[in-house]
Amino acid sequence: MSHGRKMNKMGASHPRILPAVELSNLVGLIGASYDTIDKGLLCAFVERWHPKINSFHLPIGELTITLNDVSNLLHLPIIGQFYTYPSLDAAAAIDLLVDSLRVEQGVAAAETRHCQGGHVRLSWLREMYEDACTRRQWTVVARAYLLHLVGCTDIFVTPSRLHHLSYKSVTSVSVSYLGLFVDLRHTGGYSWAAAALTHMYEQFGRWFLCKY
């Protein structure tokens, strides 16, 4: 799965929200989504993954992904607050969208119905971002941009959306992440690298089990 083209559609963040984006400590993700992915190489690594010990079995020996690797490659903070986000139902997701993105309840309800749950499409989120820019609601703009950024980063896609073998169908993001951006002052205090590493371990294991 690659959302690099979707990141390009969003474009650079508006100058008015740049301080909030930098404060989030997620700036490193902006250039982390590829336009294309070598699926053969990815499958080769998955075939060599041992889910019980979270390591690759390679000709040179065992190799694993560490927090230091995540920090160096994605420039995400290792130290910070650990977080868990609840799985929102449609009603709770609608309330969060109305409160945080200032959308009308009917608009939010229509989008969650389209996504069959507490998710929104990345394309819909880009429309909300542009609309908030027009209305000069910069806090809303920052929230929409960061939610889109998380949705475009493979390591942060909601696990419940990855039970299908086809990654092409994953074009939405969980509204649950929006709760992390309600107070933009605290966004940079999370250990994003730990969340990324945990997610990668889980998904490598899922792919291993699906393949075998």
Image (cartoon, rainbow, N blue to C red):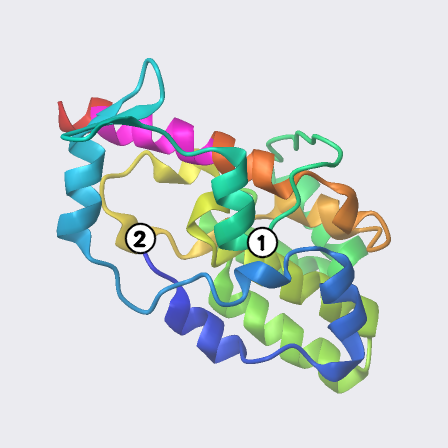
Q: 126 or 78: which is nearer to us? A: 78
Q: Is 63 in the magenta?
A: no
> Counting residues from the N terminus, which is met first, the one under dot 2 or under dot 1?
1
Q: Main secondary structure of the magenta part?
A: helix
Q: What residue range appears in magenta?
A: 199-208
Quadrant holding the N terminus: bottom left
Which quadrant would residue 165 be assigned to in this image? top left
Q: Residue at x 66, y 40 (%)?
A: 91
* Residue 135 percent across, percent down from the top left: 79, 82
Q: 149 or 107: which is nearer to us? A: 149
Q: Which residue is mark 2?
A: 169
* Residue 124 percent across, percent down from the top left: 53, 67
Q: Is 200 in the magenta?
A: yes
Q: Which residue is mark 1?
A: 75
Which quadrant would residue 50 be assigned to in this image? top left
Q: Eyeballing the image, is 84 above or below 123?
A: above
Choose mark 2 or mark 1, whichever is in front. 1
* Residue 205 percent across, percent down from the top left: 31, 25
Q: Residue at x 81, y 74 (%)?
A: 138
Q: In this image, 199 relative to 83: left or right?
A: left
Q: Secondary structure at mark 1?
A: loop
What amino acid does circle 2 point to?
Ser
